[in-house]
Amino acid sequence: MNTLIPKRLKPFFSKELKAYQEELAINNLPKAWQHLERAHVIGQAYPYEHSCVHWKMLLFGIQIKSGKEILGQIPRLLVGGVKSFVGTIPVGNTGGADIPPLKPLPIEEDIQTILETLEIKR
C-alpha cells in the first residue's frame, strides 16, 4: 500500500509539473502534455500525486476542448488514486485518454534511471 511519495522522489515529480506550467504558459501544448505524462509515470504509485496529474490532464482536456480527453480523464480521476493506494497501477502508463487505462508501458530510460537510483520499487 502506498500513501506518500518518497521525499527523494518528490523533486522529480515537481520538476515535471513546473515544466508543464512553463510550456503551457507559452502555449507549447505538445511539450506541456509530455511533461504531464512524465509526471504521471513518476507519481502514479502515490494516490495524491496520481490524482493531481489526472486533475491537471482533465483541465488540459477542457482547455484544448478535447471531448475524448475530458471523458477519458473522469474515470481515471475517480479511481486512479484508489488504485495507487492499493498498489494496482499499470506501471509506465502515461495517463492520457489515448492509452487504455490498464495498459502497462515501458518507462522512459531517464525516469527508469531515477527510480533505480533512488531504489523506488514499482
Image (cartoon, helix red, strand yellow):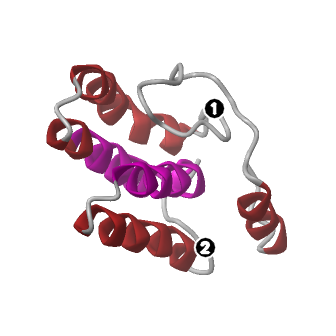
> Which residue in the protein does label 1 denote?
90
Determine the residue positioned at 26% across, 59% down.
27
Q: Which comes sooner in the sequence, label 2 or label 1?
A: 2
Determine the residue positioned at 31% across, 68% down.
21
What's the mark number on residue 32?
A: none
Q: Amino acid at mark 2?
A: Leu
Query: Horizontally, is 29 left or right of 87 in the view?
Result: left
Q: CA distance from mark 2 to mark 1?
A: 19 Å
Magenta stretch, residue numbers: 29-58
Determine the residue positioned at 47% across, 24% down.
98
> Which residue in the protein does label 2 denote?
9
Query: Horizontally, is 67 left or right of 54 in the view?
Result: left
User: Residue 94: image x %, image y %?
Assistant: 55, 40
Q: Judge the density around disc 2: few (<14), some (14-19), many (≥20) Cα neighbours within 10 Å.
A: some
Q: Amino acid at mark 1?
A: Pro
**Residue 73 placement: quadrant:** top left
User: Residue 20: image x %, image y %?
Assistant: 38, 64
User: Residue 108: image x %, image y %?
Assistant: 73, 52
